[in-house]
Image (tube, coloured by chain):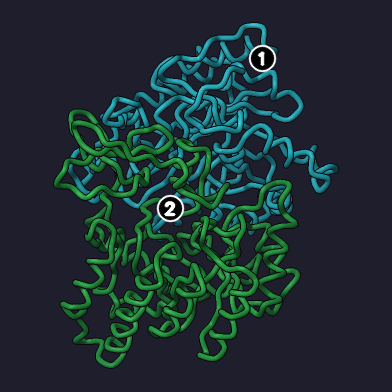
Amino acid sequence: MELLCPAGSLASLKAAVDAGADAVYIGFKDETNARHFAGLNFTERQLEKGIAYLRQHDCRLHVAINTFAHPDGMPRWQASVDKAVAIGADVLIIADLAVLDYCAKTYSDVEIHASVQASVTNAAAINFFVDNFNVKRVVLPRVLSIHQVRQLARVSPVEIEVFAYGSLCIMAEGRCYLSSYLTGESPNTAGACSPAKLVEYKETESGLETHLNGILIDKFSDDEKAGYPTLCKGRFDVGDERYHALEEPTSLNSMEMLPELMKMGISAIKIEGRQRSPAYVSQVTSSWRQAIDACKANPDNFKPSVETEQCLSNLSEGSQTTLGAYHKKWK
Amino acid sequence: MKYALGPILYYWSKQRVENFYQLVAQSDIDIVYLGETVCSKRRELKIQDWLKIAQMLLDAGKEVCLSTMALLETPSDLAMLKRYCDQKDFMVEANDLSAIQLLSEQGLSFAIGPAINCYNAQTVDLFISKGMKRWAMPVELSHDWLRKIISDPLLKDKRDNFEVEVFAYGNMPLAYLARCFTARSENRSKDECKLCCIAYPEGRIVNSQDKNQLFVINGIQTMSGLKYNLINDLKSMHGTVDVVRLSPQSEDTLNMLDNFKANESGLAPIPLGKNDECNGYWHKVEGMVQVES
């Protein structure tokens, strides 16, 4: 089982490698990357250094080209594919069918994975990606229960990768336009959800308000910790109730399911968080490294240690974690 | 320009659905999409019931297309999809790549619904090669974006091989989710949902704390809080759009069809509702915004 960790910067890449990642995933500093944030990602020089570091430590490199090509932008998306191949990426993670098509036809030897943004949730959809683009692996969206993951793993002709830890996107990834509805920018069109440039914190008499493009997402009393106004994680009114109508600000943590994931033959588990700090990447990677090794050695008696659970919980959004959709009750 | 009625996105009783399509049969609509696209637990109508309505509409002179689910998670979801893809009497609208896989394996033509990610001419071209005859673009795309795709040299000689459709009226499906939000709003889990969607024929409104109508929750689907309405943009569609889609609402859908037809050349504009309608996406801005057409 591959431990695949986020590297939004050279420092995070090194942190992940040092903490025991088997592979890291990165994106370029442009719109072909769904984490196209200011101050994130790699310059050419940093990229060279990063790759050298990975090679020294026998660690694989995945490059995510996981947005959808604009109608006049195909040459830019193709250029990202060319560049990823040129720098020697071991894997390209791609979402757009046209980009997948280009990559599969131009570089038949390159290993391609269907990105989570490609929204593959069933066996027939997996076959679509295998038949048309010869993908070697699909990354499942975080909408499936553990039972559904098991069913898919049983019939999939290719490797399955799942998200194990990090921010929880509750929607079928690649199929959520909530952000463009409120802000004009979505993950698919702009590589951004609830973009920071449109976020505003307002101190009012009744508490701290968080706004996104002028829309009130949540309001916090003095004793509450204000969270980032990700639009699906605010408190809204439905009928007479005010609550987290879509989702609480929690993080996904599937560590207690590790033995099951291993047993069903999941090939890789992915840690979310290219936007997070090197210290975060280091702590999370090292917790998962230990867990995977312990689980491999003794799968029947594996249980995350109290320290590990505490550490992961402290690092997570709102200091809360959930099994998310993996646990059926959550749905 | 042709007009299409999208699939009913809400959960209505069988009686209500049948009554609705009786009216549709007598209307001026050209194309009707039928079927459950949101949640596999909604079984007021079985596949035979849908096929019966389809035949009735066909007899009334309508073109009928069977819409399929957007989010398929289980083997039984797939088995149901397969039943739709295996019938040969009506064209199928694919809302997930799985449907395209099943249909193209059999060499069948199909329509592509707005839930499929298709953002460029190369993807349109790929779908044409698989058998696509009609393409409804994702709701978040603008007129400008569409024009760029259509005018791409790649599609120049293929423009007669497929129709372009635009979602032009109704609350837009914006996201498909792991959990059922309607059940959650009644403090129930998805497994114990008791099919409560049926109590909300237009979904449930989600307001911000300062009373902005943000979203509508409809089972596992999150929709736009405001109704999308491109009635005053029809004139701009000539030359790019072949089919205008109206999404069934609990009331007045067919009146709206008449209004759309009356304003096809811009001669009978109707001001959008100040607080409940929007048209931003078409104009390349936030979807929720209302732009002067």
Where disc 1 sits, the SS reads: loop
Q: Count the marks: how many?
A: 2
Residue most toward the top? Answer: B268
Task: State the residue at coordinates (46%, 21%).
Answer: B277
Which image quadrant for residue B217?
A: top left
Task: State the residue at coordinates (62%, 23%).
Answer: B3
Q: CA distance from mark 1 to mark 2?
A: 36 Å
Q: Residue B9: percent from the left, percent from the top?
A: 42, 34
Name the kind of residue labelled 1 in the image: Glu
Pinpoint the chain carrying mark 1. Answer: B
Residue annotated with mark 1: B264
Q: Which mark is residue A172?
A: 2
A235 or A158, which is in the foreground?
A: A235
Q: Is residue B292 left or right of residue A214?
A: right
Apparent colour of chain B: cyan
Regarding residue B271, the answer to whether it shows in the image is yes
Query: Looking at the image, is A270 positioned above or below residue B21?
Result: below
**Disc 1: CA contacts within 10 A as few (<14), some (14-19) or many (>=20):** many
Name the kind of residue labelled 2 in the image: Ala
A105 or A28, which is in the foreground?
A: A28
Regarding residue B47, the answer to whether it shows in the image is no
Which image quadrant for residue A276?
A: bottom left
Q: Residue A299: percent from the left, percent from the top?
A: 26, 87
Which image quadrant for residue A246?
A: top left
